[in-house]
Image (spheres, rainbow, N blue to C red):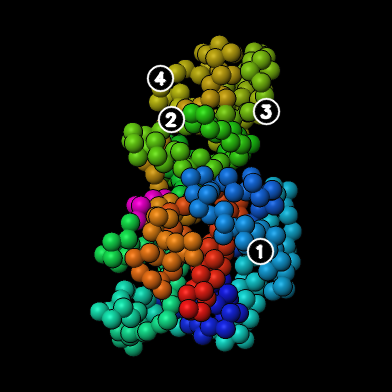
Amino acid sequence: MVAEVLSRGGAAVTVYDAMPSAGRKFLMAGRGGLNLTHSEPLPEFLRRYGAAEARLAPSISAFMPTALRDWSEALGQPTFVGSSGRVFPQAFKASPLLRAWLRRLDESGVQFAFRHRWIGWDSEDRLNFQTPNGPQVMASSASVLALGGASWPRLGSDGAWVDVLAAKRVHIAPLRPANSGFTVAWSEIFKDRFEGQALKGIALSFGAHSVRGEAMVTRGGIEGGGIYALSSVLREAVIADGKAALNVALRPDLGVDELTTKLAASRGKQSFSNFLRKAVHLSPVAIGLLLEVAIAEGIQLASLPSEKLAALINAVPVTLNGVAPIGRAISTAGGISFDEIDDAFMLKRMPGTFVAGEMLDWEAPTGGYLLQASFATGAAAGEGALRWLSR
């Protein structure tokens, strides 16, 4: 996006990419359908960025979700709004959009240099690269760094830039996993039986925060859309206390009284698991989670009064004891402090050097907010670099 804005403004642009081809992480984002942005009203949209809302509002307001949809359609990829309000290309994948985009950039004269890994500056403030042909030094009138966070490092965003910029006294908040899973000390029996299975139609709560969604049991813990929506508050609790108590409501659509009535019915000769499956329509993995927690806490589920069993079903306590590694997180929290850049996204300590995207200290939930802010800050940094060049 930076390259597009700059080339449209008449600048000669080269994109240096450490990977063998362009858009590797963009393609990864498209594996689930390429959720480009969201259709909710802008005030609600901006609130999704939490503490960074005021810092991101100008760039997103200048390149709004509607502008992103128009941009996609101009590349031959019209969009549609899904039932959740999320916006997707009609092709429902990233590759057609990326191919059309790269073709347009090529036609506008943008050059690409692949397998060029940026490693910093030389004594004359020229850009240093590691390449297949050895070290190379490049001079530029302006440069924009868009190096990502530290999630999915095999796609290029390995966070190696942190040390380079820290050496220039740029303040950087520690990079942390965002929209990530968490570790749980499951029993071997539970892991072996339910790894990879989804808890669907549940509600998840932590303190004053609650969401509806689903979660996936992993061998080492739990992940999924509902978990990601709470990941920022859960992460901070785990970092501060070493653990976090997540409550899982397995049948949030049923009130306590209705659930109690169903559980008070005669079980007959059914096994307890079959009774739960038929009486309150719990899935095998949901029943397994109930049993896992009950065994850990020394509770005899079959002996519980109906009202207590009902309360437990809609408040199953799961202890999270760690955050999943940042390399597997969807996105990254932390990064360059907004106090280090001006309104044009230029580093105050390094005139002529701009930054954009996930390098900056912001985070957002999944739902199109991550790509929207990346596009918008890229466009803003491109505009800032054009103004710099015009001087």
The residue mark sitting in front, 1 or 2, is 1
Q: Give above or below for 330 relative to 3.
A: above
Query: Total of numbered circles in the picture?
Result: 4
Callout 1 secondary element:
helix
The residue sitting at 57% across, 53% down in the picture is: 57
Alpha carbon separation for disc pair 2 and 3: 22 Å
The residue located at (36%, 75%) in the rendering is 118
What amino acid is found at the position of numbered circle 2 in the picture? Answer: Ala
Cα–Cα span, label 4 and label 1: 54 Å
N-term-proximal mark, 4 vs 2: 2
Q: Whole-percent x and y of residue 59?
A: 56, 60
- Mark positioned earlier in the residue sequence (4 or 1): 1
Q: Which numbered disc, 3 or 4, marks the residue that appears first in the sequence? A: 3
Secondary element at image label 4: loop
Question: Which residue position is annotated with label 3?
Answer: 253
- Residue highlighted by disc 4: 298
- Disc number lying in front (1 or 3): 1
Residue located beneath label 1 in the image: 68
**Spatial separation of the CA atoms under disc 3 and disc 4:** 28 Å
Question: Which secondary structure lies at badge 2?
Answer: strand
Question: What are the residue bounds of the magenta stretch?
Answer: 172-177
- Residue 245 badge: 2
**Secondary structure under badge 3?**
loop
User: Depth-wise, is mark 3 or mark 4 nearer the camera?
Assistant: 3
- The answer for how far apart the CA atoms under marks 1 and 3 are is 36 Å
**The N terminus - image quarter:** bottom right
Q: Relative to 1, does residue 124 appear above or below in the rendering? A: below
Disc 1 vs disc 2: Cβ atoms closer than 8 Å? Answer: no
